[in-house]
Image: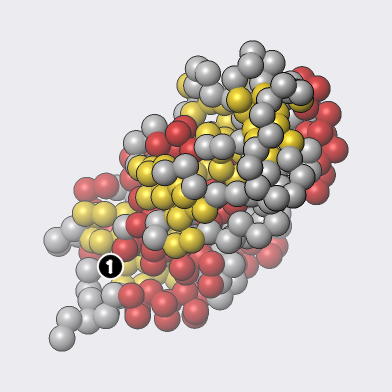
C-alpha cells in the first residue's frame, strides 16, 4: 500500500539481473490466453518462472483481512509477491544495502535477507534451499508466497489468483500498534520479540502477559511499546518502560538534537482499562495517546 524500493535501487539491481539470470525467453512456449502483449519467460533449467500477460501485477493479495493496493506493481512470476509492499503494510521495513547488493525485509516476526549477487534468500540467517528471488528491471523484489507460509507466525492460502496472508498483525493488540504507527508516521521499524526486549532493552517478560514493541533504527528515537500488564506488576512495568526511555535519551545526548528532544518528550501512559500500558516516543504523542485510550476504554 505504500512504497517501492528506493530509486537508487533500480540501477544497481538491474545490473544484478546478469548475475541472477532468472529468466530467458522461450520461443517454443505456447502463447497464453488473453489480450495485450504476451511474454513467456522460463528459467534456464526449463522450469517456468514468469508468464507476463501484461505489465501489471496479476494477482490479488489479502493481508490480514484487507486487500492490498497493488497499483503500480509490475507483473511477476506466478506465486511471487512484492516484498517491500507487504513488509511495510505489515508494519515492518525494507532496507537496501548497495555495497553488498542485498536487501533485508522485516516481515512479521522474521528477518529475510535477499542476496542479489548469490541469488539466495535467508530467513533468520538460515539459507532457504531452492528459494530464488525475482527482481523486476525497475527494482521491485518479489519472493515466493510459499516462503512466507513457512514462517512460524504466518499462514497463506493460495488459490492461484488470490494470496490470502494472515500474520500476527491480525492480533487486535498489534492492529492497535500498527494503526498508531501509521497515524503518527512513526519511524520505528525494528520489531523485537518479548525475549529480545528482555535481553536487550530491560523490559522483563514477567511483568506482562503480552507485549509488542517497535524500536528505532539508529538515527531516530521513535519508539512504541504496548503491553498488557500482569496482575500486580504495574509499578514494575512502569519502571521497565521508564528505564527504556532513559536509555533512548542517553543514546542521543551527545549528538542528533532532534531525536534527543523527542526522546525527552516521550510519555508512559496507562489506558483507561487499567491493564494496558504504553511507551510512546513520536512526533505526535498526543494523537498516539488518544488512539491508545480509545482502543482500551474503561470497562462499563
Which residue sits furthest bottom? 300
Q: Measured from the top left, where is residue 216 in percent x and y?
A: 56, 52
**For this view, does 103 lie left or right of residue 91?**
right
Q: Is residue 205 above or below residue 150?
A: below
The answer to which quarter of the image holds residue 16 is: top right
Q: Measured along the vertical axis of the image, is residue 298 above or below residue 45? A: below
Secondary structure at badge 1 equals: strand
The residue at the point 38 percent across, 44 percent down is 157
Residue 288, percent across and down?
47, 74
Residue at the location (27% across, 80% down)?
Answer: 297
Q: Position of residue 25 (x, y in %)?
A: 76, 25
Question: The N terminus lies in which quarter of the figure?
Answer: bottom right
**Residue drawn at (56%, 75%), measured in percent from left and top?**
284
Instruction: Give the residue at x 49% y 80%.
Output: 286
Q: How many marks?
A: 1
Decide: few, some or many residues near mark 1? Use Cα within 10 Å; few <14, some 14-19, many ≥20.
many
What is the quadrant of residue 173 in the picture?
Answer: bottom left
Residue bearing the label numbered 1:
276
Picture layout, residue 80 above or below residue 56: above
Q: Toward the viewer: 215 or 241?
A: 215
Near-viewer residue (158 or 194): 158
Tell me: residue 135, above or below residue 115.
below
Amino acid at each position: 500500500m505504500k512504497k517501492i524500493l528506493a530509486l537508487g535501487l533500480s540501477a544497481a539491481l538491474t545490473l544484478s539481473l546478469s548475475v541472477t539470470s532468472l529468466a530467458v525467453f522461450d520461443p517454443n512456449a505456447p502463447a497464453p490466453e488473453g489480450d495485450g502483449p504476451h511474454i513467456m519467460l522460463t528459467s534456464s533449467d526449463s522450469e517456468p518462472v514468469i508468464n507476463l500477460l501484461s505489465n501489471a501485477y496479476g494477482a490479488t493479495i489479502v493481508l490480514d483481512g484487507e486487500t492490498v493496493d497493488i497499483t503500480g506493481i509490475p507483473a511477476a512470476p506466478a506465486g511471487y509477491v512484492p516484498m517491500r509492499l507487504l513488509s511495510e503494510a505489515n508494519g515492518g521495513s525494507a532496507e537496501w544495502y548497495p555495497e553488498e547488493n542485498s536487501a533485508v525485509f522485516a516481515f512479521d516476526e522474521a528477518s529475510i535477507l535477499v542476496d542479489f549477487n548469490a541469488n539466495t534468500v535467508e530467513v533468520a540467517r538460515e539459507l532457504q534451499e531452492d528459494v530464488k528471488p525475482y527482481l523486476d528491471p525497475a527494482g521491485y523484489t518479489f519472493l515466493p508466497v510459499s516462503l512466507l507460509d513457512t514462517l512460524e507466525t504466518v499462514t497463506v492460502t493460495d488459490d492461484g489468483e488470490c494470496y490470502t496472508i494472515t500474520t500476527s498483525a491480525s492480533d487486535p493488540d498489534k492492529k492497535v500498534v500498527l494503526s498508531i504507527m501509521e497515524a503518527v508516521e512513526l519511524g520505528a521499524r525494528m520489531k523485537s520479540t518479548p525475549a529480545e526486549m528482555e535481553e536487550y532493552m530491560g523490559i522483563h517478560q514477567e511483568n506482562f502477559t503480552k507485549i509488542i514493541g517497535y524500536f528505532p533504527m539508529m538515527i531516530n528515537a521513535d519508539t512504541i511499546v504496548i503491553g498488557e500488564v500482569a496482575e500486580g506488576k504495574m509499578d514494575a512495568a512502569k519502571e521497565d518502560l521508564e528505564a527504556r526511555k532513559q536509555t533512548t535519551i542517553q543514546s542521543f545526548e551527545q549528538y542528533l538534537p532532534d531525536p534527543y528532544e523527542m526522546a525527552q518528550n516521550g510519555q508512559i501512559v496507562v489506558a483507561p482499562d487499567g491493564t494496558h500500558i504504553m511507551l510512546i516516543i513520536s512526533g505526535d504523542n498526543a494523537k498516539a495517546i488518544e488512539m491508545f485510550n480509545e482502543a482500551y476504554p474503561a470497562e462499563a
